[in-house]
């Protein structure tokens, strides 16, 4: 199980800084998910680790060994690209056994491992099929099986579940993590699917424009975002702009426009500082009009969206701001009506507080 380190790694394509001074450590046996918007550098990062690209600056090491100039075939990695790269002239079974046989495994051992992973990805009934005879989703599953059966200690997975139907994708998330863990492998898994990353990752790396915005456990990334970009990119978040009015030992009072005021737990800001408050939609609740609890913000219902397991209720506050509350369906006793007066609330402990960025909120949360 290799420990992978990137030390001040950069990669440019012309004037584009695809990877910009990245420092990252992937521990032995860890399952890392790299998450970011399109064009953030996720695939480039994976290809640098695989050896398919060479960094312009910085060092990449495996277990302390510098691998910048080591070719891909000597890195003991299995790279699963988005394009699958199956051998078109080989059957599914031959594709999957290729890796272990090339590494010197006995034929019986290679076949047993191949059948095991093909059963996991539900392709055990198509072992004699050629790639051209498979759907795109089946080809992706075959490529995933080949990577898992390869015998490499480091798996580099680029959107490994992206072409699968929703039900199978959800099921394979758990199987994939379990197989990687039981085989004692290290995995770096690129995805655009936030829920997928939250479920399978030991830690998540959030990338934007080639730079690491935050690294942490799914819990930490979700509930303690490092900045406004992460708070906006991960999950569904409400934002309010205001001014610190008063600070005491238990928290602070933040004054919004039109005389509205909320309480937060944050005590590191000074009175008159401009701040942006961030609170998750599922940590925001709606109450009957006239409810007089903590952070009671009156408004009117502007939209109601049924999400299956919950309702998203959009409320326009009296100062014009829009807040959304994601309410579990089991807690909905009366379906809200458009124009209905409600109170939106949230706990002070559930609010993250950020300084107003010099370049403005909209620029701060841009994905590029």
Image (cartoon, grey):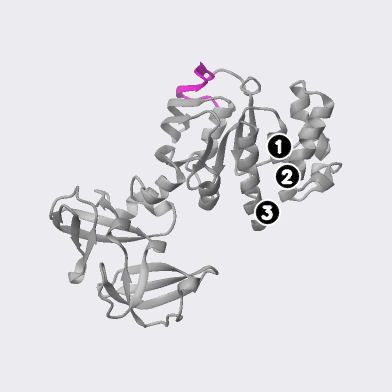
User: Position of 192 compared to 126: left or right?
Assistant: left
* Residue 1 seen: yes
- Which residues lie in the magenta part? 53-68
- Residue in the picture at 74% in, 37% down: 86
Name the one closer to the observer, 74 or 149: 149
Of labels 2 and 1, earlier in sequence is 1
Residue 163, percent from left and from top: 66, 50
Name the one closer to the observer, 335 or 136: 335
Rendered position, 61 above or below 309: above
Which residue does the numbered mark 2 point to in the structure image?
Answer: 120
Spatial CA span between label 3 and label 2: 11 Å
Which residue does the numbered mark 3 point to in the structure image?
Answer: 168
* Residue 88 seen: no
- Asked if the residue at tag 1 contacts the one at tag 2, i.e. Cβ–Cβ closer than 8 Å, the answer is no
- Location of residue 327 (image quadrant): bottom left
Helix, strand or loop at label 2? It is helix
Of labels 3 and 2, earlier in sequence is 2
- Asked if the residue at tag 1 contacts the one at tag 3, i.e. Cβ–Cβ closer than 8 Å, the answer is no
Mark 1 is surrounded, within 10 Å at the Cα level, by few (under 14), some (14 to 19) or many (20 or more) other residues, namely few
């Amino acid at each position: 199980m290799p420990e992978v380190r990137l030390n001040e790694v950069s990669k440019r394509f012309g004037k584009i800084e695809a990877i910009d001074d990245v420092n990252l450590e992937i521990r032995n046996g860890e399952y890392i998910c790299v998450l970011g918007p399109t064009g953030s550098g996720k695939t480039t990062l994976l290809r640098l680790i695989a050896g398919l690209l060479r960094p312009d600056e910085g060092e990449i090491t495996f277990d302390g060994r510098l691998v910048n100039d080591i070719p891909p075939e000597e890195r003991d990695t299995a790279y699963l690209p988005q394009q699958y790269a199956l051998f078109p002239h080989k059957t599914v079974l031959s594709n999957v056994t290729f890796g272990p046989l090339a590494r010197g495994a006995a034929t019986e051992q290679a076949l047993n491992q191949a059948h095991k992973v093909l059963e996991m990805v539900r392709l055990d009934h198509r072992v004699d099929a050629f790639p051209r005879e498979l759907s795109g989703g089946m080809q992706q599953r075959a490529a995933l099986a080949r990577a898992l059966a390869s015998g490499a200690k480091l798996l580099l997975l680029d959107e490994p579940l992206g072409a699968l139907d929703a039900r199978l994708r959800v099921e394979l998330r758990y199987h994939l993590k379990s197989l990687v863990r039981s085989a004692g492998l290290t995995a770096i898994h690129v995805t655009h699917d936030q829920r997928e990353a939250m479920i399978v990752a030991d830690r998540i790396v959030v990338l934007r424009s080639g730079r690491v915005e935050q690294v942490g456990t799914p819990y930490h990334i979700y509930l303690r975002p490092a900045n406004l970009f992460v708070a906006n990119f991960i999950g569904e978040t409400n934002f309010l702009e205001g001014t610190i009015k008063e600070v005491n030992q238990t928290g602070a009072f933040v004054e919004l426009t039109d005389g509205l005021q909320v309480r937060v737990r944050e005590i590191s800001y000074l009175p008159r500082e401009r701040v942006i408050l961030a609170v998750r939609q599922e940590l925001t609740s709606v109450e009957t009009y006239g409810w007089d609890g903590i952070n009671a913000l009156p408004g009117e219902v502007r939209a109601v969206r049924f999400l299956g397991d919950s309702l998203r209720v959009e409320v326009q506050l009296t100062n014009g701001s829009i807040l959304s509350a994601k309410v579990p369906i089991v807690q909905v006793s009366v379906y809200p009506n458009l124009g209905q007066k409600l109170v939106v609330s949230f706990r002070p402990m559930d609010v993250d507080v950020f300084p107003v960025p010099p370049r403005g909120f909209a620029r701060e949360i841009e994905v590029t």
